Structure formats: structure tokens, C-alpha cells
């Protein structure tokens, strides 16, 4: 048995697509356990880019894929991704938890209306209906995958819910331009297309683990966006930390062997909210352009900044991280100096801990440690460098990785020096004892 969780340490967009795809090469099963199609994971294979929003990233490895109960599923998006793969000759081996909740058009309408209503307190959502779907889940109004594959059950529940959702949207002043009949027809058709993939996913998964299968749990977003442990309320609507791998798939914590924390060599985030190390100068623009820091789901430019160690150390503690995967080290190449935030000042106080609120984090001023930068790799040579291993990397880059490990308290398990699979250096193979 070997169960490994991959979870974001920052504000999302840490490169989970690439790292999940890489480790999936050694796994038998890849499980998506949280979030919805607000999360975008990019995988690059032989120069071709694939963007996934619901499909687990093991799809390109031909692995068994499971969408767990903790995910909120937009059936239209999922079916589009399945078709996209089939056009490339890939038929995903997919199972979907019958307990996963389903996103409906009224969730998207509510998402838009709620954001408008919140004004300056808006969360900066992607308006994909994720938050309202989780609201319904918590309020016990939700419809699940097991409902949409049974027409009579679906009809009964839509008949009951439709007037309520109509009133909710009207209260917020939102638009309500779909009918109950359209809704039933559309989602009945989705259920028909998806029913052969639906199963008791936690039973299948636990049987596989007990049978010795290697399982990779694919996280979404990042710890600083978690509904409980992130920077509330400018985060996501669900738990995205390592513990959610268990609740979002139906696997006991006692079966998890390793937790890999994903961090970029710098930080980025999309949307509103505090970012203490944000760079608003030419260096920030250099990192944004070189790192292609634009949202996979929204296309929005990401804000960027120097690596934030207090936040990284906090995330390591929350997730019980075994080791780090450090991505986009190549993006910082070419800078004369690089910086790491080691602590904050708030007024006259100095702290190395993350405060609990946006208001306090906004007041944090970073203290930096400055380090020497490293030269860029020759064009097209990153794969060759990766094959030779960690030892051939520039001394300054190795010093930077060592400093991250020392300050965060977590060893480096993997480093990435380019977007492709082959531009990866593994320091510890988590699927080998």
C-alpha cells in the first residue's frame, strides 16, 4: 500500500498539474478529492498543453481516475473534457462518486448575483457556481450524481428546489432565464451520458488500497485559500488541505503515507486579497511574463511576489507535509538577486506567523533575506540538465532550494526547472520504500 497526497502550499497555481502528472507515472490510481471547475491544472507533454478543470491529471498516463465525493461536478464541463481527450485518442478510465454534488445553472446565476451583492467584500470567485453548490451541500439542498442518473428522483427534487432558487436569485437582483423543463431535460441527458461511470467510489478505492494499489490524491487550489485555514473570506468554498483528501474520497487518514506540499519558487495569486510580498515593479512583470502567470480557468493575470516563508511554514504545519515539490525555479533564472520573506512586521511587532484575518495580513510588511540569483539554462537544455540531476545545477540555485527547505522545515522531494515532464528532478521517489 502507498497513498500519497499532493496539496498546494500557497494561493493555488503552484504547478499541481505537472507534478501530479509526473508522479502519476508511478501510481495506479489518481483521485481528485476537492473543488470544482474553478481549478485549472495544466499538463505539458512533448510540447502540447492540456488544461484540465475536473478530469484528474493522471488521464494522460492511462491511469484509473476517480472523481471523489468532495468534488462539485459541472457535468457539461466534465463531458467536454472527456471529448477533448477522445479527440486525441485517449479514452479516460474514469469513475465518479455517486455522492459528488452537481453544479446547476442556478448556482452560476447565484454566484454572479452574490458577488455583486457583496460589493467591496466580494471573494473574487470565478463565477462557475462553486460556492453556491457547496452552500447547497451544507444546507442539505444539494443534488448529487446519484440523483441525476435517476430521472424520477431528479424530477421530484427539481420540482421542489426550483421555486426556492428562483426566489434566491431574485432577492439578489440576479437574472433567472431558464425554465424547470429545460433544467430537467438538460440534466437528465447528462445523467444518461455519465451513468456508466458512476459508482460507490470510496468502496472501489478502499478495495484497491487494501489490494496494494498505489494511489495519488490530487489536490486543488492552495492552503491559503482553504475555507477554514486560508485567508477567509477571499478564498475558495471548500477544504483543500491534506485532510480533505480523506473526507473528499472516503479514505481513512491512517492509510495516507506521504503528503507532498507544492510551492512555486515565488508566490502568485489571482484576484483580490492581501499578498504581503507582492511585486508591483519591473521584477514582478518579468516574473509574470516569464512564468506565464495567467489563470488557466479565467485567463486573469496573476499577481506575483517573492516567496513567503511564514505562509509556507504555516501550510507545512497545517498539512503535515513530508516533503516539498518546488516548481518554476527556471522562472527566477536570470535575476541578479532573489529574495525570500522570512518574517513580517505589524506595527511595532515582528512575527513569523500568519495572522488570522485579511485585515491583519494587509498590515504585514515583509522582512527579506537576499540571495544571489542564477544564470538561465541554455535554450532547450533544461531536459538534459534534469537528466544529469541535482548536482549539476548552479550553486546559487541549489543554495536557494536548501534555504527553502531549512526555513520551511521540509525537505525537497522534487524540483521543476521547466514546464515539461522531462524537466523535473526527483530527490525522493515517494512510491518506492
Image (cartoon, helix red, strand yellow):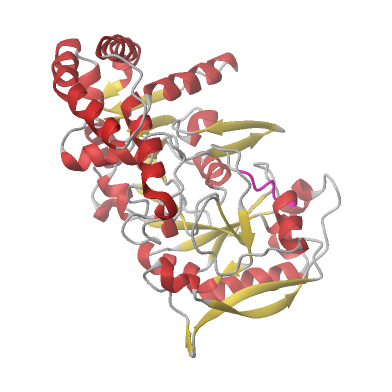
Q: Is residue 251 above or below residue 351?
A: above
Q: From the viewer's perspective, tell me whether residue 404 is left or right of residue 123.
A: right
Residue 6 appearing in the image = no
The residue most toward the right is: 378
Residue 406 placement, left or right of 149? right
In reply to whether residue 293 is colored magenta, the answer given is: yes
Residue 71 seen by the camera: yes
Residue 390 higher or lower than 48, as above or below: below
| Front residue (pair 156, 254) | 156
Q: Is residue 79 above or below residue 123?
A: above
Q: For residue 32, what is the image quadrant?
A: top left
Q: How many marks?
A: 0
Residue pictured at 49% horizontal, 90% vertical = 348
Q: Position of residue 120 (x, y in %)?
A: 44, 54
Please give left or right for residue 45 compared with residue 154 in the image. right
Q: Determine the main secondary structure of the stretch shown in magenta.
A: loop
On the image, the x and y values in percent for residue 10 come to: 50, 59
Q: Residue 270 in the image: x percent, y percent?
A: 55, 50
- Residue 418, given in percent of the width and then of the height, sits at 70, 48
Q: Which residue range is magenta in the image?
A: 290-294
For the point 22% across and 33% down, the residue is 203
Q: Nearer the viewer, residue 221 or 327?
A: 221
Q: Quadrant of residue 249?
A: top left
Instruction: State which quarter of the image contains the C terminus.
Output: bottom left
Residue drawn at point x = 74 percent, y = 49 percent: 289
Verify whether residue 404 appears in magenta: no
Q: Is residue 191 left or right of residue 416?
A: left
- Decide which of 105, 242 is in the foreground and name it: 105
Amino acid at each position: 500500500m502507498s497513498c500519497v497526497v499532493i496539496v498546494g502550499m500557497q494561493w493555488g497555481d503552484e504547478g499541481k498539474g505537472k507534478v501530479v502528472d509526473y508522479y502519476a507515472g508511478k501510481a495506479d490510481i489518481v483521485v481528485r478529492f476537492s473543488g470544482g471547475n474553478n481549478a485549472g491544472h495544466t499538463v505539458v507533454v512533448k510540447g502540447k498543453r492540456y488544461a484540465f478543470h475536473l478530469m484528474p491529471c493522471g488521464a494522460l498516463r492511462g491511469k484509473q481516475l476517480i472523481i471523489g465525493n468532495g468534488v462539485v461536478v459541472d457535468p457539461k464541463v466534465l463531458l467536454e473534457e472527456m471529448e477533448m481527450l477522445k479527440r486525441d485518442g485517449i479514452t479516460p478510465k474514469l469513475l465518479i462518486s455517486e455522492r459528488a454534488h452537481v453544479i446547476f445553472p442556478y448556482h452560476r446565476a447565484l454566484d454572479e448575483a452574490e458577488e455583486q451583492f457583496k460589493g467591496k467584500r466580494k471573494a473574487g470567485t470565478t463565477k462557475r457556481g462553486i460556492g453556491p453548490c457547496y452552500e447547497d451541500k451544507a444546507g442539505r439542498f444539494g443534488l448529487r450524481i446519484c440523483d441525476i442518473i435517476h430521472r424520477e428522483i431528479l424530477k421530484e427534487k427539481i420540482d421542489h428546489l426550483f421555486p426556492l432558487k428562483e426566489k434566491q436569485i431574485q432577492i439578489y437582483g440576479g437574472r433567472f432565464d431558464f425554465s424547470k423543463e429545460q433544467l430537467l431535460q438538460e440534466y437528465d441527458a447528462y445523467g444518461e451520458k455519465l451513468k456508466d461511470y458512476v459508482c460507490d467510489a470510496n468502496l472501489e478505492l478502499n478495495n484497491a488500497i487494501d489490494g496494494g494499489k498505489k494511489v495519488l490524491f490530487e489536490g486543488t487550489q492552495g492552503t491559503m485559500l482553504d475555507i477554514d485555514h486560508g485567508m477567509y473570506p477571499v478564498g475558495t468554498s471548500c477544504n483543500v488541505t491534506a485532510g480533505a483528501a480523506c473526507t473528499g474520497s472516503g479514505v481513512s487518514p491512517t492509510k495516507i503515507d506521504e503528503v507532498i506540499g507544492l510551492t512555486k519558487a515565488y508566490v502568485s495569486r489571482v484576484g483580490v486579497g492581501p499578498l504581503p510580498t507582492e511585486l508591483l515593479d519591473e521584477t514582478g512583470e518579468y516574473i509574470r511574463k516569464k512564468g506565464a502567470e495567467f489563470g488557466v480557468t479565467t485567463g486573469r493575470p496573476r499577481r506575483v511576489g517573492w516567496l513567503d516563508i511564514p505562509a509556507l511554514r504555516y501550510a507545512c504545519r497545517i498539512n503535515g507535509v513530508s516533503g516539498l515539490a518546488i516548481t518554476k525555479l527556471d522562472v527566477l533564472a536570470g535575476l541578479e538577486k532573489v529574495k525570500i520573506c522570512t518574517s513580517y512586521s505589524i506595527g511595532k511587532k515582528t512575527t513569523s506567523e500568519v495572522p488570522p484575518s485579511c485585515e491583519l495580513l494587509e498590515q504585514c510588511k515583509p522582512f527579506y533575506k537576499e540571495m544571489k540569483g542564477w544564470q538561465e539554462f541554455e535554450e532547450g537544455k533544461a531536459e538534459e540538465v534534469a537528466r544529469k540531476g541535482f548536482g549539476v545545477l548552479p550553486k546559487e540555485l541549489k543554495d536557494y532550494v536548501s534555504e527553502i527547505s531549512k526555513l520551511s522545515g521540509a525537505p525537497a522531494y522534487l524540483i521543476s526547472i521547466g514546464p515539461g515532464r522531462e524537466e523535473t528532478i526527483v530527490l525522493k521517489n515517494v512510491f518506492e520504500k
